[in-house]
Image: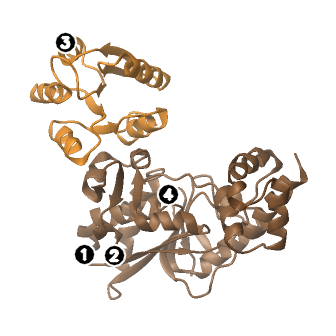
Amino acid sequence: MRTAVIADDSAFVRKAARVILEALGFDCREARNGRETLDICHEDMPTLLLLDWEMPELDGIGVATTLRAEPGRGPIILFCSTHNDLDHIQQALSAGSDEYVMKPFDRTILEDKLRSIGLVN
Amino acid sequence: MSGATEALRCFVRNRAGINLGADKDYLVVSRLKPQLSSWDVTSLDGLAERLRAQPKGALADQVIAALTINETLWFRDSKPFDLLRTVILPELVTRKATDRSFAIWSAACSTGQEVYSIAMTLREEEAQLRGLRATILGSDICEPVLARARTGIYTQFEVQRGLPVQRLVRYFEDLGGEWRVRPELRSGIEFRALNLLDLPLNIGPFDIVFCRNVLIYFELDVKRNVLSALAARTKPGGYLILGGAETTLGLTTAFSPVPGTAGIYRRTT
């Protein structure tokens, strides 16, 4: 089964993302900060990491950079942030993000993004 | 539902060939009612009456724009763009030994996403095109959506529908909340209001025609007429790309399917 880690310090966003991803067939786990995200990923690497930018302890860029520096394939990283400008998007791509969702998002956007990276048909 | 919705469905069928069945009455109501006051009428009956008196003009165009389905996204269905890259362009390049240009038509382009998706594909295939230059015509029945297509400006929501972020970064300018297609991608593109039921003779002929998810809204005889009009504007050996649920089979012999592909046809000679 495809697995996803939803990393966001907002419980509301985590819940909204979980509802959408579960409907698309993902088995979801949640992380509330960057450290927890790395711990959960290291325990069992997910197919997809939906990654917020601003999080306590370690931000999304720190998480992406750490995971990309490690051996192995790592997850497909889908940044999901309110930093909706070109500079931030480029920074996320440089840190190893595969795609970028600008908040606010809905099922349509998330599904289109997952389709474009080949995770849903 | 009232006679007004029937009259309005009839109006769109006659003017744009789009067949909205009685089950689409809700669409007529939900899309037109909010705009009634801006058209200075108080009811759908009043609107139908105005259109009977004036079946052409700004009001008629706005009603057609409101009732035609404008949903569009970047690289919609992805397959046609893959086939453009891997099947159509390689064949065109070998055939265009002397004529160094080719013409593409996106025949129902709405707000322009298909046109710019084609332009991006061509830009990414520059090496295989070996200097071959393309012009792209984007047309739609609705001038208001074409006006948006010409600006090349899209909302944050729109640029996230089917457009990989790497292409957003490469081909768009950040306007702060909105995104604009870069001028270099917009060059060589023209947008023009055209009704597929009433095409002028002086357009084309084209090497590649995209006409996707349009025929599905037409009745059988209208489909035949539109395909015949498209054939007259497609070069012999040129390509027609239809939507996944559309076909030329049984409707015309002017196009034949390209073996091993879905939705791609060639103009017979």
Q: Gap between marks 1 and 4, in whole Å?
A: 25 Å
The residue where tag 4 is placed is: B261
Q: Colour of chain A?
A: orange
Residue at the (90%, 53%) spot, across then down: B3
Closer to viewer: mark 2 or mark 3: 3
Chain letter, brown in picture: B
**Viewer-side label of 2, 1:** 1
> Is A111 on the left or on the right of A83, as rendered?
right
- Label 3 marks a residue whose chain is A
10 Å neighbourhood of mark 4: few (<14), some, or many (≥20)?
Answer: few
- Residue A84 vs B45, above or below: the answer is above
Q: In the image, what residue occupies the spot 64% across and 61% down?
A: B65
Residue that badge 2 annotates = B93
Disc 2 + disc 3, Cβ < 8 Å: no
Callout 2–callout 1 Cβ contact below 8 Å? yes
Q: Chain of mark 2?
A: B
